[in-house]
Amino acid sequence: MNPVETKLDPDKIRAALSGFWNNALAIEAVRGGWALAMPQTDAEGWQVVVEITGGAPGKVRVSDAGRTLGGLEMLGQRTDSEVVDGYIESILRQSHMEREGSELFRWLPLPLDPVEVHIFAEALSAVSQLRVLHEPSLRIQDLADMTLQQVFADRHIEALKGISLPGKTEKRVRVDYVVESTRQVAFQILRRRGRLLPVMEQWGYRWQDLQKVNSSLMPVMLYNPAVQEIDEASRAIGEEVCSLFCAYDETDRIHGVLEAAAS
């Protein structure tokens, strides 16, 4: 029997970790700057995405583009509640971040200090963990899930639930349902009350990022008109980037997109 090797080589450990971090980091051009998919992950297991854009002379703006708080709100977590807001403000103070609506950001001087970008990503990950403070109280889309599952049953389709798809910048994007057909169909149900534009902007980016890897992907987004009022800008984004953007009870249209995907 060969003796068990107990001596660790720090150079090999460093090389292995450096290789992982380098492979995990993805950088893609966005309007006015760069989007970075960082090695850190949020509470859902998605890579934290940071955008770095130009600004004042000698400075850059580092932002999450509203993804973090928008993600919490999509899960039904109220970010304006006293308890959650208190935790958010504490993390912002500790990491020197600012908040503007759903967006979290910092101004950093040039040359860019990578430690500060790392700290910013860590803070975003910490904010995302606040979803576990309590069970989401807003389950506004149960009817949408039930209706969509009935469409799948009527068509004898086994849809995959809660699947992560590969993107180009965001390595993993989780969607509510995926149907494997001649063309892959991804379904996402809007679950947020109130102002929807930040969520639609986020998903507009995500759908385009997914289609850079799978150009034939057919995105479908559904909403509940009884509790969600779709503004013109949100509708324009949905209709531009999705193969179908409609109310959950427009089942004829959902059947239609599934037929088109199978043809």
Image: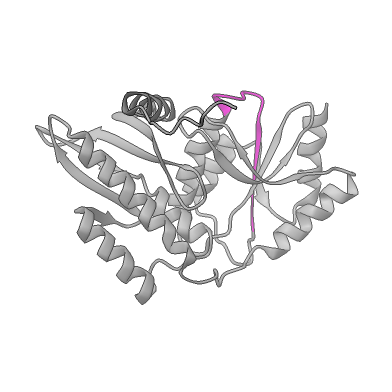
Q: Residue at x 13, y 29 (%)?
A: 111
Extreme-left residue of the structure: 57
Q: Is residue 180 left or right of residue 27?
A: right
Q: Residue at x 52, y 57 (%)?
A: 74
Q: Give how far across and how far down residue 44 sits, in percent.
A: 52, 50
In which image quadrant can residue 59 be found? top left
Quadrant showing the C terminus: top right
Q: Is residue 75 left or right of residue 10?
A: right
Which residue is more in the foreground, 224 or 205?
Answer: 205
Q: Give how far across and how far down residue 25 sits, in percent.
A: 39, 29
Count of labels shown?
0
Q: Residue at x 32, y 29 (%)?
A: 10
Query: Is residue 214 highlighted in magenta?
Result: yes
In which image quadrant can residue 255 be found? top right
Q: Give how far across and how far down residue 66 sits, in percent.
A: 38, 49
Query: Is residue 110 highlighted in magenta?
Result: no
Report if residue 76 is visible in the image: yes
Extreme-front residue of the structure: 1
Depicted 219 relative to depicted 129: above or below: above
Which residue is more in the foreground, 91 or 177?
Answer: 91
Q: Which residues are magenta?
A: 211-223
Q: Residue at x 55, y 26 (%)?
A: 2
